[in-house]
């Protein structure tokens, strides 16, 4: 057993303990998640995967502190998550940029909110430029969201999240709305960025290949209602990872098959009434 406190904190950096989430609806109480237990180590890349409506976003929102659980507790670095915080930045699928601000302005706003009290304008500008450079968007800094592609908007969203120097990056299907080629490019960029920043990442995805390519750990949720974690798969593929080389890799295929088997054999897709 490891009794070193800092190592314990690092291993259970995010700790989800016996979490239940129910919602009050017009038809009564709906139990979305129950008995969810999960620990995420510092620097780990974790994907949440499961059929539509099983509760992936609900779990991500709980970690983000956007909602509070009806039972159980969530911890980040040993502190209870009681609301959103700059140490946990969220990237949504629909990039949620302010349309009247430039790419630079959108990132600067986040930088100012987090560092505005402690740093001067030149330092804030430097942080903003560095975040845009990290996602390869320095050239588009003065463009507005309406003037750039979906993939570029998503990169601004990632730059904005990273610019806050969060300890945890929470991503809800960040590439879901993109075409396959742009998606692949952004996945590769994310791999490089995370390798550089050592961020802890929790990402919701529907995409088995995306989950295997990016993750250290794939958390598979059972179908709802009352969804829970069905299985956790450790992905021990060495890094840096190359999608081209992995396509031929026998272990990659085994991981892929394990997730597909869980999703389509053991959790055969049941469409629920809305
Ligand atoms: N605020 C809410 N009020 C009532 N029900 C909710 C609420 N939020 C989520 N739900 C229900 O909880 C379940 C889980 O929803 P959630 O959005 O977490 O699923 P998901 O796995 O992220 O789905 P998808 O992959 O389709 O985005 C669904 O049945 C959804 O209808």
Image (cartoon, rainbow, N blue to C red):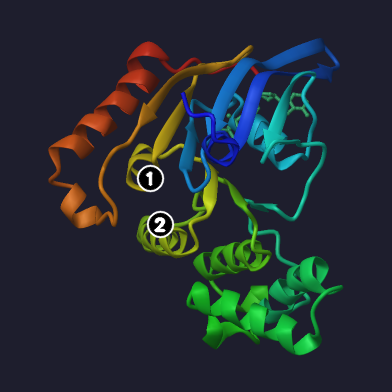
Q: Is residue 80 above or below residue 246?
A: above
The quadrant in which the C terminus is found is top right
Quadrant of residue 209 in the image?
A: top left
Please report the residue visible at 65 percent of the width from the left and 87 percent of the height from the top: 142
Give x and y (percent) for residue 227: 59, 16
Label 2: which residue?
187
Q: Quadrant of ligand 1?
A: top right
Residue corresponding to mark 1: 210
- Give coordinates of residue 187: x percent, y percent: 40, 57
Q: Depth check: give the residue in front, 254 or 217.
A: 217
Q: Which residue is depicted at the point 70% across and 37% down?
A: 61
- Which of the two labelled residues, at mark 2 and mark 1, occupies the earlier sequence position? 2
Instruction: Tell me if 142 is positioned left or right of 85 in this view.
Output: left
Where in the figure is residue 21, as x and y percent of width and height? 73, 20
| Badge 1 element | helix
Dot 1: within a 10 Å radius of its alpha carbon, few (fewer than 14), some, or many (20 or more) residues?
A: some
Contact (Cβ within 8 Å) of mark 2 with mark 1: yes
Give the quarter of the image for residue 86: bottom right
Residue depicted at 53% across the width and 54% down the height: 199
Give above or below for 132 relative to 142: above
Between the residue at mark 2 and the residue at mark 1, the CA separation in whole angstroms equals 7 Å
Few, some or many residues within 10 Å of mark 2 (<14, 14–19, 20+): some
* Residue 112 tag number: none
Q: Is mark 1 within 8 Å of ligand 1?
A: no
Secondary structure of the residue carrying numbered label 2 = helix
Q: Is residue 178 placed above or below 51 in the rendered structure?
A: below
The x and y percentages for residue 157 are: 62, 63
Q: Is residue 172 left or right of residue 218?
A: right
User: Horizontal placement of 144 versus 134: left or right?
Assistant: right
Q: Residue at x 70, y 29 (%)?
A: 74
């Amino acid at each position: 057993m490891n009794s070193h406190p800092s190592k314990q904190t690092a291993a259970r950096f995010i700790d989800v303990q016996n979490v239940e989430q129910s919602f009050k609806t017009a038809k009564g109480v709906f139990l979305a998640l129950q008995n969810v237990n999960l620990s995420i180590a510092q620097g780990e890349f974790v994907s949440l995967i499961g059929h539509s409506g099983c509760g992936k976003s609900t779990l991500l929102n709980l970690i983000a502190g956007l909602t509070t659980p009806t039972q159980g507790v969530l911890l980040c670095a040993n502190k209870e998550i009681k609301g959103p915080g700059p140490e946990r930045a969220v990237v949504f699928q629909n990039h949620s940029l302010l349309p009247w601000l430039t790419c630079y302005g959108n990132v600067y706003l986040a930088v100012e909110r987090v560092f505005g009290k402690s740093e001067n304008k030149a330092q804030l500008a430097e942080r903003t430029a560095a975040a845009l450079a990290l996602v390869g968007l320095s050239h588009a800094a003065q463009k507005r969201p309406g003037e750039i592609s979906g993939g570029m908007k998503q990169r601004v969203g990632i730059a904005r999240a990273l610019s806050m120097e969060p300890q945890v990056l929470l991503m809800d299907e960040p590439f879901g709305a993109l075409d396959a080629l742009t998606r692949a490019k952004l996945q590769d960029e994310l791999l490089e960025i995370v390798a550089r920043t050592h961020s802890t990442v929790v990402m919701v995805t529907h995409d088995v290949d995306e989950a295997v390519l990016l993750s250290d750990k794939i958390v598979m949720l059972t179908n709802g209602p009352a969804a829970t974690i069905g299985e956790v798969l450790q992905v021990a593929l060495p890094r840096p990872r190359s999608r081209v080389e992995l396509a031929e890799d026998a272990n990659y295929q085994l991981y892929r098959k394990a997730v597909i088997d869980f999703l389509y054999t053991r959790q055969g897709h049941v469409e629920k009434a809305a």
